[in-house]
Image: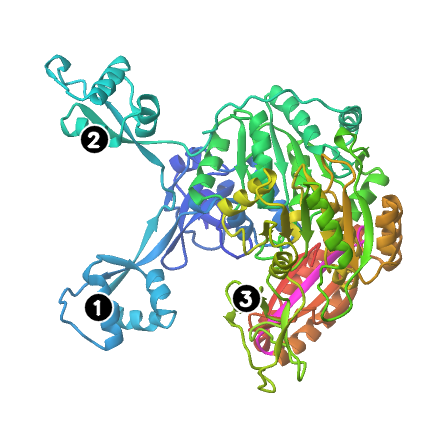
């Protein structure tokens, strides 16, 4: 069939490829690449789709549906974003619909909802008790979303709904809803139709309001503004409204750009910072990507600010990416003092409505912006982007593991900089092995900053032996002595333990049985504040068990160390000292996180106990001691990156000490004082560590000398999983030229009742594209076999876990 006008669209669902729809001539020339349309999908559903291609005189061998209607005339995504989304989908083997769904704010992706309406209005009607339970909900509601009923009754309710529809008691329709809600405030203005000469007011406050609004006759003001300026109560305003002297209206307001100017002295760079800044600029003349290796507390942020300022002066925007949402809290306070009217903070935890407005503002406004964002900020619709800065580029948090798309935001940002023809700066005190190798092999520009800002010395790092006896405190005597000295010198302390909770696990003294999660292959972690054993993988929890589930004796005892345990031990040894935890449990809300960081920065408490969150770029001026407690497990973890991760973690957490004071210390409690990674940390031989790791990876054929793909297979039936995994690994060996490892069970081999097996593929860089195409085709075949229908298969390109 031939169509005069057609478009290829991407629908935000987990299906590969474009979908083609026809449209009229006027619609065709009105719509642009990157605009949104509503399309029917399947029998009844309607989705928002984004136009990726336009065609005239289009031939196709089946009948096309028509576009239902146009949402945007101006596009909601740019041409560069379309190139980027296509690349990301292709490189990470993710359906393009899933990539689009990850990129756009949810409020842009309008879709239809299944809505039920009651046809029979007789309230006394009863079919069965369960039906009546559904029907009585309609007594106070004209319509109810099917999803709401599923939330109340579970998925089994769908059969009962079908029966009620068949009996013509309920009617099912598809209706389209928008999720974006405009923010409004109440404004007051003078009613200009009122003759003020005839108004007599006894209240001084009412007269103040009247005079102020009369002086600004054509303006309206918010309640907060009037209260701030005049110091009157709401009741004063409402009384004037009742007398029809004031008018009250709701007006839309932006959620963004509400900051006030903050005075700040100009940045004064040290000689080392100036040299590094000049080195970066010179390197950008020859390289698109530059790596800044700056030791902790060397002042990399000040260099970032200088580079951003230069772009703003040129009329360009800048993107500064950080690996954790937590880091945006502290860094936004610093950046807002330099860029009060330009700063945008963008990440997945801001409200959907705020994300909608930020995105729209970037699409419609060419004003230079400073975007501070986490992983998802790489998808924004940039205009005139002058530089991308990726801080702490080595962090695993830049890699998304679940859900799809499993992209690395650092690597994606580097590719985006090529599309936008802009500069890209990678910053870290401990760059990834891949980045370091690309730097010394001159693929990237390379600049080093080896002096701390203010000429403060790096902390002295020492290894101390972990306590051996069961009745000993896990806070060793040496560590407790240093804590005491540090407190006497009025300095603060950070204690790092990469496990939250009170105890890592509960173990039976009599039979050595350990309490495991019933859904996952992991121990339950005890949380003393709630007296609960919790699984950190599936959220299963239960009250602490006293009796052993195996021998039934009341002999369960606590084992291991969590952040809550450290908190309890500190109370025992230092009862008058205030401490606070910084982990997932204590920072579930943005406000709690911000309060903990602010309180520590102004010395409201002396000891901060934390997980990896305390190692990532936080800047506190008065930390004199960092203690690392029981992190040896990383040295022995079965991952080719484990030594790299341990080195980075220790160096980063050490960098929180002595940022504005001299003679700071870092104590590492370990059972492996002679380990070669510890030797490199103690003697400060960073280059030696990196060269050793590079040599090891070259010898064993790991990145950066190859590219990895991990195939993850899951099933509730372990025997079926083994069968499918062996079949697929054989298919890979028969069809690919790459080295295939596995299948093997991972360290955690069951999550949420799904058993897991992994297959690792080492692909040569030169044949990467061809091998990924073969892998992609094979991954689509497994579910075509009836016996493997229930097996879930996914592919992770460049995996980090």
Q: Nearer the viewer, mark 1 or mark 3?
A: 3
Q: Residue at x 57, y 73 (%)?
A: 517
Query: How far apart are labels 1 and 3 at the CA level?
Result: 41 Å
Circle 2 — which element? helix
Q: Is residue 586 above or below residue 121?
A: above
Say if mark 1 contacts mark 3, CB within 8 Å.
no
Query: In which image quadrant can residue 143 be found?
Result: bottom left
Q: Main secondary structure of the magenta part?
A: strand
The residue that disc 2 covers is: 238
Region of the chain picked out in magenta, as a range: 703-717
Q: Residue furthest bottom?
A: 551
Q: Position of residue 561 (x, y in %)?
A: 66, 64
Say if the magenta span includes residue 705: yes
Q: Residues within 10 Å of mark 3 (few under 14, many from 20)?
A: some
Mark 3 or mark 2: name the one nearer the start of the chain: 2
Query: In which image quadrant can residue 452 be found?
Result: top right
Circle 3 — which element? loop
User: Does the rendering let one see residue 145?
Assistant: yes
From the viewer's perspective, tell me whether residue 442 is left or right of residue 32.
right
The residue that disc 1 covers is: 168
Q: Residue at x 22, y 58 (%)?
A: 141
Say if mark 3 contacts mark 2, CB within 8 Å.
no
Q: Position of residue 170 (x, y in %)?
A: 23, 65
The quarter in which the C terminus is drawn is bottom right
Query: How far apart are labels 1 and 2 at the CA level?
Result: 50 Å
Q: Position of residue 21 (x, y in %)?
A: 44, 48
The residue that disc 3 covers is: 538
Q: Position of residue 358 (x, y in %)?
A: 48, 36
From the viewer's perspective, tell me whether residue 47 is left or right of residue 144.
right
Circle 1 — which element? loop
Mark 1 or mark 2: name the one nearer the start of the chain: 1
């Amino acid at each position: 069939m031939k169509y005069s006008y057609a478009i290829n669209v991407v629908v935000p669902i987990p299906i590969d490829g474009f979908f083609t729809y026809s449209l009229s001539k006027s619609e065709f020339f009105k719509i642009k690449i990157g605009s949104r349309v509503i399309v029917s999908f399947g029998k009844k559903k309607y989705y928002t789709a984004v136009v990726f291609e336009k065609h005239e005189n289009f031939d196709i061998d089946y009948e096309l549906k028509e576009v239902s209607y146009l949402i945007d005339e101006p596009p909601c995504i740019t041409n560069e974003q379309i190139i980027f989304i296509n690349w990301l989908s292709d490189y990470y083997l993710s359906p393009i619909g899933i990539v689009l769904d990850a990129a756009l704010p949810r409020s842009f992706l309008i879709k239809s909802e299944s809505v039920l309406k009651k046809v029979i209005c007789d309230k006394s009607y009863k079919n069965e008790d369960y039906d009546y339970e559904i029907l009585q909900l309609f007594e106070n509601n004209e319509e109810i979303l099917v999803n709401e009923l599923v939330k109340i009754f579970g998925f089994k309710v769908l059969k009962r709904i079908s029966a009620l529809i068949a009996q013509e008691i309920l009617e099912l329709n598809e209706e389209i809803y928008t999720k974006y809600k405009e923010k409004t405030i109440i404004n007051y203005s003078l009613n200009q139709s009122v003759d003020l000469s005839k108004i007599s007011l006894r209240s001084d406050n009412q007269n103040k309001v009247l005079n102020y609004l009369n002086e600004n006759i054509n303006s309206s003001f918010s309640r907060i503004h009037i209260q701030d300026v005049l110091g009157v109560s709401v009741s004063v305003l409402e009384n004037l409204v009742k007398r029809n002297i004031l008018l009250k209206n709701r007006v839309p307001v932006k959620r963004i750009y509400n900051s006030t100017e903050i005075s700040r002295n100009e940045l004064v760079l040290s000689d080392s910072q100036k040299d590094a800044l000049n080195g970066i600029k010179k390197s950008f003349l020859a390289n698109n990507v530059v790596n800044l290796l700056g030791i902790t507390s060397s002042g990399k942020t000040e260099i970032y600010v200088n580079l951003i300022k230069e772009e703003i002066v040129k009329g360009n925007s800048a993107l500064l990416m950080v690996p954790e949402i937590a880091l945006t809290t502290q860094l936004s306070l610093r950046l807002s003092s330099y860029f009060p009217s330009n700063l945008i903070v963008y990440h997945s935890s801001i409200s959907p409505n705020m994300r909608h407005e930020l995105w729209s503002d970037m699409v419609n406004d060419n004003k230079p912006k400073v975007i501070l964002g986490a992983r998802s900020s790489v998808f924004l619709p940039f205009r005139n982007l002058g530089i991308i800065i990726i801080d702490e580029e080595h962090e695993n948090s830049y890699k998304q593991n679940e859900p799809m798309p499993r992209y690395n935001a650092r690597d994606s940002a580097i590719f985006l900089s090529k599309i936008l023809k802009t500069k890209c700066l990678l910053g870290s005190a401990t760059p990834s092995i891949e980045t370091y190798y690309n730097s010394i092999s001159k693929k990237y520009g390379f600049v080093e900053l080896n002096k701390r800002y203010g000429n403060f010395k790096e902390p002295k790092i020492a290894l101390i032996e972990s306590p051996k006896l069961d009745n000993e405190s896990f806070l060793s005597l040496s560590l407790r002595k240093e804590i005491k000295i540090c407190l006497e010198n009025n300095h603060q302390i950070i204690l790092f333990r990469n496990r939250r909770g009170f105890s890592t696990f509960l173990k039976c003294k009599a039979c050595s049985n350990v309490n495991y999660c019933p859904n996952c292959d992991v121990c339950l972690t005890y949380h003393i504040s709630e007296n609960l054993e919790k699984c950190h993988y599936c959220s299963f929890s239960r009250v602490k068990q006293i009796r052993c589930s195996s021998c039934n004796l009341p002999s369960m005892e606590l084992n291991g160390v969590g952040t809550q345990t450290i908190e309890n031990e500190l109370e025992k040894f230092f009862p008058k000292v205030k401490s606070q935890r910084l982990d997932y449990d204590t920072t579930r809300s943005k406000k709690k996180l911000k309060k903990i960081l602010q309180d520590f920065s102004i010395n409201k408490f002396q000891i901060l106990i934390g997980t990896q969150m305390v190692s990532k770029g936080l800047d506190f001026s008065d930390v004199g001691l960092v203690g690392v407690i029981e992190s040896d497990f990383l040295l022995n973890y079965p991952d080719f990156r484990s030594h790299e991760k341990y080195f980075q973690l220790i160096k980063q957490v050490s960098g929180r000490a002595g940022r504005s004071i001299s003679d700071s210390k870092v104590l590492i409690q370990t059972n492996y004082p002679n380990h070669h990674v510890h030797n490199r940390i103690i003697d400060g031989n960073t280059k030696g560590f990196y060269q050793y790791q590079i040599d090891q990876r070259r010898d064993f054929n790991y990145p950066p000398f190859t590219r990895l793909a991990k195939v993850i297979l899951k099933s509730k039936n372990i025997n079926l999983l083994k069968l499918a995994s062996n079949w697929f690994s054989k298919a890979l060996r028969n069809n690919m030229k790459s080295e295939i490892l596995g299948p093997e069970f991972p360290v955690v081999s069951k999550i949420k009742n799904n058993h897991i097996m992994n297959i690792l593929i080492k692909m040569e860089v030169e044949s990467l594209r061809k091998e990924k195409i073969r892998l992609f085709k094979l991954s689509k075949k497994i579910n075509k076999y009836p016996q493997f229908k229930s097996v879930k298969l996914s592919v992770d390109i460049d995996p980090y876990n």
